[in-house]
Image (cartoon, rainbow, N blue to C red):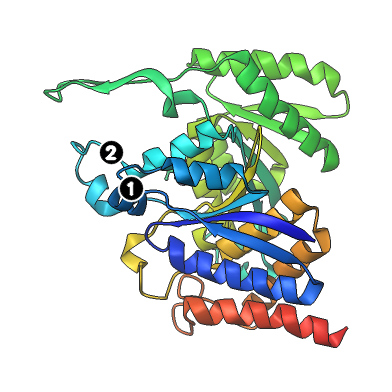
Amino acid sequence: MRGKIAVLPGDGIGPEVIRVATGVLKAVEERFGHDFTLTYGEIGATAIASAGDPFPENTEEICRSSDAILFGAIGTPEYDNNPAVRMRPEEGLLRMRKTLGLYANIRPVTTFDDLITLSPLKEERIRNVDFVVYRELTGGIYFGKPSFVAKDYSKAVDTCSYSRIEIVRIARLAFDAAGKRSGKLTLVDKANVLATSRLWRKTVQEMAADYPNIVLEFMFVDNAAMQMILNPAQFDVILTENMFGDIITDEASVITGSLGLMPSASVGETVSLFEPIHGSYPQAAGKNSANPMASVLSLAMLLEHSFGLAEESLAVREAVAEAIARGIVTNDLNTTKFFTTTKVGSAISDIILSKSLAE
Ligand code: IPM
Ligand code: MN
């Protein structure tokens, strides 16, 4: 198989973890006989520095002319601590999502047997956890207008806005996903307070008629945040709006054991994008210590979603699980015996290649 992948390492630990993911891709190419062409593009703070724009036109072209996008992370602290700054790196990511029509962000939450004792949550609560969050990604309070801060900083406004069509298109994906899984869909909203949430609830309720085999539940987001800790195994597919999804998926990463293990896929109108859910983790940037597994697992999602390479995707996920089982992990997963980012990466690649010798 031949394919074109846009690679956008971005800021902070992005370049290090993406380097590992592309190394793993090489191992996959070698073992399974594929040939992918990678085209690199700039995004975020690095793109502001070099092109004066966090999502330059050239990067957009690279994305549009590829079959899939592999993205690292965005953001640097200089911008976070300076609210007056004119252009923010995150704008690049948000504009990319919007421009490319990436309206559904799919975030699977699973556990690894060898890590189950690592979560701060009790083992019996997280043992059978296996759910997926469908987070709306191009609407809501992230994009609503008006949005401004008064010049004298006496007031600020953000607007949460949704239209029916924005809800229908992601809800379809979530209903379909539930149909392929255990058949349960939970809409997380705040319909007791927010008008947009009432629109979500009404729209999804009406759609349920087309999916008679799906059990549809509703849960307020404050309760969902609590249930995710109390009894996360109750969830199968969660559907939610942009900001609720952002918040509850960081919370959900605690179940898995580390934010450094959570991959995601953003899909929509055209080309799909794959990214770890962790941010740019600037404290670790350049130290060769960040966990590359979320990026590698994002690559696994890419192989399956964009190229239909299910066996290859499984081989990557199994190699990650085996590296974990052998204790070849970064310091987020084991604070006493840990390895570097590059060492974890080469171990995963070696496991993939050694399986090809064994066959
Ligand atoms: C994420 C991130 C982004 C978001 C930031 C970096 C803009 O937290 O992908 O979850 O809030 O969507
Ligand atoms: Mn987030």
Instruction: Relative to 248, say whether 109 is above or below.
Output: below
Tell whether 310 sits left or right of 21: right
Instruction: Let me know if residue 125 appears in the view.
Output: no
Residue linked to disc 2: 87
Tell whether 316 sits left or right of 285: right
Q: What crowding class fits label 1: few (fewer than 14 Cα within 10 Å), some (14-19), or many (20 or more)?
A: some
Q: Position of residue 3 (x, y in %)?
A: 71, 56
Secondary structure under badge 2?
A: loop
Tell whether 30 sits left or right of 125: right
Residue linked to disc 1: 51
Q: Position of residue 261 (x, y in %)?
A: 57, 62
Asked whether mark 2 and ligand 1 are closer than 8 Å, the reply comes as no
- Point out the image quarter for the N terminus: bottom right
* Residue at the (77%, 38%) spot, across then down: 177
Q: Amino acid at mark 2?
A: Met
Instruction: Let me know if residue 255 appears in the view.
Output: yes
- Point out the image quarter for the C terminus: bottom right
User: As rendered, which of 63 and 164 lies closer to the eye?
Assistant: 63
Which of the 4 image quarters holds residue 197?
top right
* Residue at the (45%, 69%) spot, across then down: 290
Secondary structure under badge 1?
A: helix
Tell whether 26 sits left or right of 193: right
